[in-house]
Image (cartoon, rainbow, N blue to C red):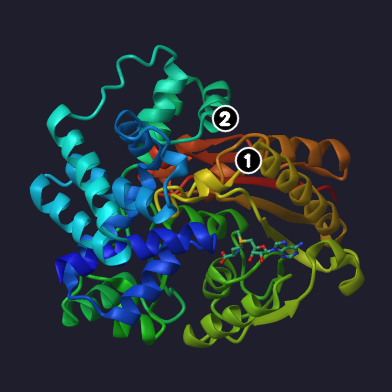
Amino acid sequence: MAANVREMALDLLLKVEREKGYSNLVLNRMIEKYKPSPPDAALLTEIAYGTIQRKLTLEYFLAPFVKKPDKLDHWVKLLLLLSLYQMKYLTKVPDHAVIYEAVAIAKKRGHRGIAAFVNGVLRSAQRKGLPSFDPIADPLEKLSVETSHPLWLVRDWAEQFGLETAVAICRENLEAPRQTARINGYLTDAEAVLKRLEEEGIKAEKSDAVPDALRSVKGNLAKTGAYEEGLLTIQDESSMLAGYAVDPKEGETILDACAAPGGKATHLGERMNNTGTIIALDVHKHKTRLIAEHAKRLGLTNISVRNADAREAGKLFAEETFDKVLVDAPCSGLGVLKRKPEIKYMRSPEDVKKLAEIQLEILDAAAPLVKKGGSLVYSTCTIHRRENQEVARAFLAKHPEFAEDRSLRSRMPAKVRPFVAGFEMELLPQHLKSDGFYIACFKKKV
Ligand SMILES: C[S@@+](CC[C@H](N)C(=O)[O-])C[C@H]1O[C@@H](n2cnc3c(N)ncnc32)[C@H](O)[C@@H]1O
């Protein structure tokens, strides 16, 4: 079985690169299909995620042993990288076992020549040792190679946050993500959910940062009766904070302009005790279906799903229709690199610029729909100031009918308040070991 795990890991890496798929989705599909035992599934996750997380570092390790790595068949290069990952970071697996299995895969997929090549490369790496980072003089280049983040991103973060914070972000991104869930406060409470989970053999605990959140200690919260029964929703703690920022009240009319798959819309629905109206809009039809499914599972009937481009929302709704509007905008996702490490290699500075423009366009379209005295909340799961802060300032400059809403801090849980400044929250992944997240709140003048 162990050799199969490595082959599955190789297939996963190929799929993620070829189909530009998200690693977590490809991994889930693979586990559903091949049903590996729990220890094999854990090993598969570790090897595949680890290799993606450390790709640039592993390429640096490989370089002295292969003259032209880019000339290699792609699968051969990935096989070498995932083998080097195991040799360097999986201390429980002896090097000779890693090499033996890599050679067996190479023989099966290729031919004897390739198997001999793989054997030669890995044996030299074992004999000579992997190269040190010491010769890299430039601190940003070193950080990029050592923590496997593209140089442009490391540069941007160092410029925006300072080198020390950029180092902390990059290091934290290499940690395993926590699994957290949101308690459905409309149907239940933390004690009841914890009891239900315990009956199912799952160990979880209350978050010390976000009152609506549970953290898994042992077991997968998504595969539980409690989940099926609508008592919880898988969601990162940082995303729950958008619900605190919006602070919906019973009976209100709220627009969630970028709502799929419905994580935040359903949170608002729960906090409103299934009263009022939430319009959950999304441009992608296949994703809007998910919102309705989640709402149903959670026992919510106050969410109405619409499929449309938020930039055209003015054609759907009259001005000043909503008490509150949430724009949880499409973004570069640079706050969720622990969970989706491949994003760091897919994104470019041009993407960041383009996404910032789209975010501002959506905010522009949402602005007239907010009632006087109502609020507009802009959030993203990215930590790049070309989006976030720059977009928020551009919005305020264009919309004198809105003011900074500096009451945000008072709505946030105590542990989050240090990360709120004025009308904005910037949560970096190392702050609470969550995803990175940004929120800005605006109030429409009366
Ligand atoms: C960050 S995700 C939203 C996550 C969602 N709020 C949740 O909590 O589950 C951004 C969403 O914006 C949608 N989107 C992208 N461009 C859009 C547009 N122009 N109008 C409306 N939705 C858009 C995407 O389909 C995606 O589902």
Q: Which residue in the protein does label 1 denote? A: 348
Q: Residue at x 31, y 62 (%)?
A: 9
Coordinates of residue 40 in the picture (x, y in percent): 18, 68
Disc 2 residue crowd, few under 14, some 14–19, many 20+, Cα 10 Å:
some
Task: Give the residue type that dot 1 points to.
Answer: Ser
- Which is more toward the observer, 221 or 153? 153
Report if residue 231 is visible in the image.
Answer: yes
Decide if residue 334 is in sight here: no
Disc assigned to residue 133:
none
Answer with mark 1 or mark 2, whichever residue precedes in sequence.
2
Q: Secondary structure at mark 1?
A: loop
Query: Label 2 near label 1: C-beta < 8 Å?
Result: yes
For mark 2, give the secondary structure.
Answer: helix
Query: Picture coordinates of residue 211 (x, y %)?
Result: 38, 58
Q: With respect to residue 306, does 96 lie above or below?
A: above
Which residue is drawn at the image coordinates 26% and 72% (left, top)?
191
For residue 122, side relative to residue 176 (left or right):
left
On the picture, is 197 further left or further right than 241?
left
For this rendering, which residue is in front, 68 or 373? 68
- Compared with 151, 118 (above or below) is below
* Residue 152 circle label: 2
Judged from the image, the quadrant occupied by ligand 1 is bottom right
Q: Residues within 10 Å of mark 1 (few under 14, many from 20)?
A: some
